[in-house]
Image (spheres, helix red, strand yellow):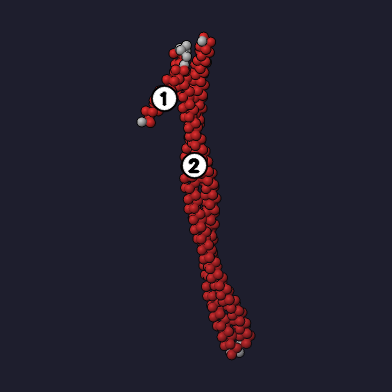
Amino acid sequence: MADKVKTTKKKSTKKSKAAEIPPMVDSKSIATAETGLQEMAEGTEALAAAEELSTLGQVVMAEGASTLTRGIDALELSERASQLGKIVAAAGVNDVSQGAEMLAASDDIAIMGTVIAAMSTADLDRGMELAGISGQLTAVGKVLAGLGLPIVAAFLAGKGDRLGEIAVDNLVRAGANRALSEAISATGEQMASLGANEVAEGLTRLAVSEDYAAHSEQLAESGAELTAQGMAQMAEAQVLGEITQALAEEGIAQVAGGADQVGETASKIEAAETQDKKSR
């Protein structure tokens, strides 16, 4: 019902406007005015569409800039992770190298301890042998002294005492060598343990460096994708901006052209009304 009332009002308005047009104005001028109004309406619609596209372009441009920024950040993080992975890898290689050197040194120390232990056994055997000979010479000297040979007995006793001193030195050296051998063996074991720890730490760091490298690759791929996406969005926003500008220019031209046509017809109507008044 309301639509019918509106339609009736529009028709009556058109009739009243048509009634206001002087009869001297030709139909061509009226058509020109109607065409101008149509162009003005189309121009207004084009301007509204340009405004919407402009807003959309701004949103797309902002999203593109944000995506591009995130892509660049990801690439920078990728580079940092790569550098950190290289540093950790270098430290791991150094640890493994030091550990290997320590293990090799522990083997050398173990061999040295074995050699000293063998020397200790040899000194012990020689000391015991000399101690036995010293005792034998002392006993023979006492027998010779009982047989009335004091000079020979004294000589043998002196040699027996000297051999006894040498035997004691060998036995003391054997004990010292044994203690040294045990100390060297303990040092070798400690060195081997330290070397094994260094190797383990180095291998752990190498594994961590591989994780850094993998993470760096993932960040690089993500950064490249985001960068490409952001650039594509910004390019799309630029295209939207060009379309917006074209629509705006077209809308302005249509509104201006329509206004000129309406103005031309209005001028004709005004001139006709003036002439009509004069004729009366």
Give SS at disc 2: helix
Kindly identify the amino acid type of the residue bearing the numbered disc 1. Answer: Lys
How far, Cα to Cα, is label 2 from label 1? 61 Å
Across and down, in percent, residue 39 comes to 46, 21
Assess disc 1: are there few (<14), some (14-19) or many (≥20) residues with their C-alpha within 10 Å of its C-alpha: few
The nearer-to-camera label among 2 and 1 is: 1
Q: Is residue 52 left or right of residue 146?
A: left
Q: Residue at x 56, y 85 (%)?
A: 139
Q: Is residue 106 visible?
A: no
Kindly identify the amino acid type of the residue bearing the numbered disc 2. Answer: Gly
Q: Residue at x 57, y 73 (%)?
A: 176
* Labelled pair 2, 1 in contact (Cβ < 8 Å): no
Give the residue furthest to the top.
Answer: 279
Across and down, in percent, residue 55 comes to 50, 34
Is residue 256 shown above or below 161? above
Give SS at disc 1: helix
In the picture of the structure, the residue carrying the numbered disc 2 is 223
Give the residue furthest to the left.
Answer: 1
Q: Quadrant of residue 165?
A: bottom right
Q: Quadrant of the N terminus?
A: top left
In depth, the one of 193 and 57 nearer the eye is 57
Q: Residue at x 47, y 14 (%)?
A: 22
In depth, the one of 266 and 187 nearer the eye is 266
The numbered dot on residue 10 is 1
In depth, the one of 206 and 102 nearer the eye is 206
Across and down, in percent, residue 111 comes to 52, 64
- Give whichever of discs 2 and 1 has the lower sequence position: 1
Is residue 147 shown above or below 122? below
In depth, the one of 165 and 262 nearer the eye is 262
Q: Is residue 10 visible?
A: yes
Across and down, in percent, residue 44 comes to 48, 26
